[in-house]
Amino acid sequence: MRDTAPSLRLFNASLRFPAQMGRVGNLRIAREKRADVGSELVEVGPGRYAVQALKDISLSLVPGDRLALIGGNGAGKTTLLRVLAGIFDLDSGLREVNGEISTIFNMRLGFEMAETGYDNIMLRGLIEGHPRSMVEMAVDEIADFSGLGEYLYMPLETYSAGMLARLAFSIATAWDASILILDEWIGAGDAGFLKMAEERLITFVDKVQILVVASHNGAILRRFCNKAMVLAHGSLVYEGEVDTAWKWFQDHQKAKFAE
Amino acid sequence: MILSVGVADLVAALRRHELWRVLALYQLKRGNARTKFGIAWHGLSFFILVGLMGFMYATFMHRPLDLYVPYLAAGQLGWRFISPMITEGLTVITGGRGLLTQRPFPISFLPLKLACYHLYLSGLHAIAFIAILAIYRIIVVPNPLLLAIGLVIVTVAGVGTALLLGIASVFHRWLQNLIPSLMNLAFFLTPIIWMPNMLVGGDANHLSVDLTHGFTGRSTFVLLNPFYYFLEVVRGPLLGYQVPFIFWFVASSIAAALMICGLLILSRTKPRIILNL
């Protein structure tokens, strides 16, 4: 089944979120003040609004592509990542995937705090979609890398934030995937672990054929990515090299503040 | 086919049984974490409540203990599966937001996990059920084959209901406020603590509704209650009394209808569910 190379494509992808929480009655008057952040608000019925989270996005990723998503708050980065991961279906447009997708959005997804580290390794492995037998094969390697030793026999409640991050990271990077989608990088963990983590991440990312990362950290994007897209108000506004895209984004942010 | 999206979702969810079984087990443990006896509390509280209630109500209603206690315990056992599949089914999808927005997951995964959790819980209740009978020195002779069929019917109905109500309440949250209070009422309207023949006026020692006198206003009241049918296909085999065939037919028909409605609403709304969580 692996004869086709991995690819990830979007054609004119658009997506709206219904805004149904509470009343949005005065919005019509407030429309005079356009927000600098967020995506466009569209009226979909009398007094009913929707957030146009993505608008006509097209992209095509093939092996070797490492895409950085750049944009301000609410520009649509996370939404786009979730569309790419297959979590959100599109309102219009097309999504085409070849290959296995792995995602790291929430490092602590599904952790059961009252259970032991070992039990949580199994749990997270199953959540990632691996069969029990496959997780069992990876357990020792994950346990080793986490450096948590005897703590793996203790419930997660006894872990510090940094220890939790170690475990989460060790699990999240344990299996190879052909397409990897990441939302922000991990911040916790002590210096020793961060250095190990960085090396592991580099080999992990190197094994991946297509990478998509959203981050507010220019240094990280420059280091891991070879192309970039800038999002604003749910639309694709710039496409190009990481360096130039980052600079373009910075200049635009400054220009906005200068206004 | 109009059901194809829903069926594909259900099949994908069934394939992930390793995960929902583990999650159901953790949910079971979570309720009684850090307590003495741990998950045994689920059974212990059933044992204490139903054990005492059996004695009290048998006395109040002048029923022989060996008839009433197993009847009440078996009814409670069944109701404690049926009722939460509705009340917890209402929030099963909205409560799964954390999982559904992080990874692509089949929607029916959540109702399956809920059913699995309540089957585990019923297992603990069943142990308490046996203990209650032992205390009162009562012997019942269950019919294991019919019991298994009854459990399948109730489980299918439960998963279908949780899917149907869980999705409906994503779009109409007020259902989560309304239905639980109606379920409290349903508990008293359904023959669980009272016996149908106390109302219908048939043979008092006969546990299933006595229809030898034909349909009356009172027997119609009992027979119009859909919960009664689901309760009977579990309670009958558990206590070893004869349940008329019509009960099996009605219960399995409603179960199939609920499952089809659940899959239908899933097929129609699937892309919109996650956006509305």
Image: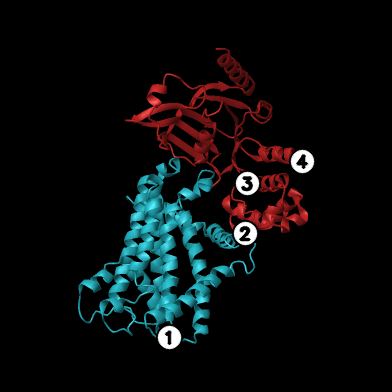
Chain colours: A red, B cyan
Helix, strand or loop at mark 1: helix
- Please tell me which residue lies in front, B143 or B31: B31
Marks 1 and 3, how far apart at CA: 52 Å
Tags 1 and 3 both on a single chain: no
Q: Which quarter of the figure has residue A252? A: top right
Q: Relative to residue B23, is residue A20 drawn left or right?
A: left
Marks 4 and 1, how far apart at CA: 66 Å
Q: Would you say the residues marked 2 and 3 are in contact, meaning their CB atoms lie under 8 Å apart?
A: no
Look at mark 4 in the image and give the residue it sits on: A190
Residue drawn 49% across the image and 25% down it: A233
Look at mark 1 in the image and give the residue it sits on: B66
Helix, strand or loop at mark 4: loop
Q: Mark 2 lies on which chain?
A: A
Look at mark 3 in the image and give the residue it sits on: A108
Amino acid type at mark 4: Asp
Q: Would you say the residues marked 2 and 1 are in contact, meaning their CB atoms lie under 8 Å apart?
A: no
Look at mark 2 in the image and give the residue it sits on: A133
Amino acid type at mark 2: Ser
Q: Where is residue A199 in the image (x, y as percent from the top left)?
A: 74, 39
Q: Which chain carries label 1?
A: B
Q: Where is residue A46 in the image (x, y as percent from the top left)?
A: 32, 30
Disc 1 or disc 3, which is closer to the eye?
1
Q: Residue furthest front?
A: B60
